[in-house]
Image (cartoon, grey):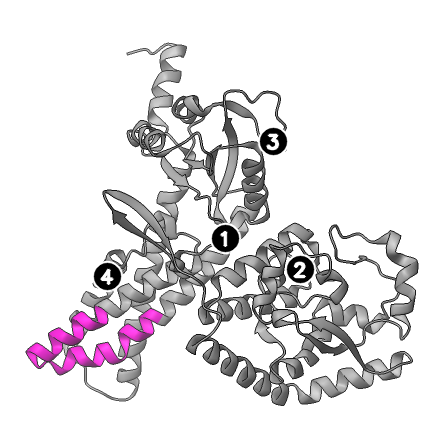
Amino acid sequence: MRVGTGESVAVLLKAVPRRASSIWTRAYLRLLLCGDTVCALLACLCVLGVRLGAGAFIPLVEFVLGFALVIAWPVALLMGGAYRQRANGEGTEEFKAVFNGGIGLMAAVAILAYATQTAIARSFVMAMLPLALLITLYYRYRMRKRLHRRRAAGDYMREVIAVGHRESILDLVMQFRRQPYHGMRVVGACLPDDTVDVDLDGIPVLGSFGDVARVVERERADAVAVLACPELDGAALRRLAWSLESARTDLFVAPALLDVAGPRISIRPVAGMPLLHVEHPEFDGARQVVKSAFDRLGAAMALVLLALPLLGIALMIRLTSSGPAFFHQTRVGKGGKTFRLVKFRTMVADAEQLKGALVESNEFDGVLFKIRNDPRITRVGAHLRRYSLDELPQLLNVIRGEMSLVGPRPPLPDEVDQYGADVRRRLVVKPGMTGLWQVSGRSDLTWEESVRLDLRYVENWSLILDLQILWKTWSVVTRGEGAY
């Protein structure tokens, strides 16, 4: 049967998946499935190989059991949620799902082995399954890094229609562009009916609040992000969700309460209404005692390990420029209390006296003073700043209890004098040697972005978050990006 040109186009359009993201999503999930299975197979072969190398006799039943566990491994991860689309590339959630699936399989096999008094299964629980978990976590970490690189290049992105007012949409666009690893890209916006001729930094305005479903169908968008606005109440959101249901388009709703992480938020039904319960952050008590102990112990261990490199840096500074090796400066800590911060000197000895002549060259917006090519910086100091080595002496401030390993940036007194009421919220916790600002752009951030990151840390701090930031700090510092 011959098909005309118009019919050919129609047939091809029907054959093509509705959204391009569904193609890479399915391919990525298949890659994860195959990789996880290979990880379990490698663990099985390693255990069997070690036992064979040690001269142990392995009956056929153990080979069968081993390969049965290889098949059961991706099934366990599936039940743990490791193949959910929303977990792709989101490190904590993805790793937690893999861990839960692996631990679940270990528990199931251990219980079965205990119930049947099978010694063979216990050997695999103690060796193969933990090894499979470690290899799988490493594989997922490498895949996550690969996915982030592809997203930074503009691939593997989900196209989003943003619904809300101009300011909130611009903020969302800025966040997605700065953090492309989340895999979200705003391709259009729907604004209130009376909004015309609005500049959204290159994002086209495709309709009003009543046109969202038609815009999504026309643009073949993957998701809709509804930002906080009074026009879209509960009834309107419910109708919007119904209109997107048939196309399986994801709906994200941003609450008016910003920068509060999931652990502090829970949904509680009251009188038939789902209400958000927001717990207060903990700034005192047992958790703070644990954090303080962790900071001081970690700083003390770091000083012992880095004693010789610190001595070498101090000698290098003294030999290459006149002046002391260390630089002391008054900073503002927790509760507005000042302290003497210690750093390696990276500028000429009279840098503070020369600052007045350079005020007009300030390249930073807001209350901070920074110059990308500051003429006061010494040759050795430039290298120290690039890799944040000049901040290592702050470990002494951490041991004295004036700073934390992780926290907001320690501000100068004249900066604090310009703080508004909201920004002063940064002072309810100790400042840190590193923080969200360090792993999210460092000096390339604007003043508003750095403040927002500091406030986000204050509202959501936890020991797990500190560990994540410390882990990310290593890769950021070794690349030397955004430091001057």
Tags 3 and 4 touching, CB below 8 Å: no
Q: Position of residue 133 (x, y in %)?
A: 33, 69
Task: Give the magenta part as a residue range.
Answer: 105-133
Residue drawn at x 46%, y 55% is: 260
Residue behind mark 1? 259
Q: Residue 123 lies in magenta, yes or no?
A: yes
Residue behind mark 4? 76
Which marked residue is nearer to the observer: mark 4 or mark 1? 1
The image shows residue 217, relative to residue 136, as above or below, that is above
Secondary structure beneath label 3: loop
The image shows residue 199, relative to residue 341, as above or below, that is above
**Label 2 is placed on what type of residue?**
Arg
Residue behind mark 2? 442
Q: Which mark is residue 200?
A: 3
Residue drawn at x 54%, y 44% is: 176
Position of the C terminus by quadrant: bottom right
Q: CA distance from mark 2 to mark 1?
A: 19 Å
Q: Which mark is residue 69?
A: none
* In the image: residue 433, left or right of residue 128: right
**Label 1 is placed on what type of residue?**
Asp
* In the image: residue 59, left or right of residue 356: left
Residue drawn at x 87%, y 69% is: 352
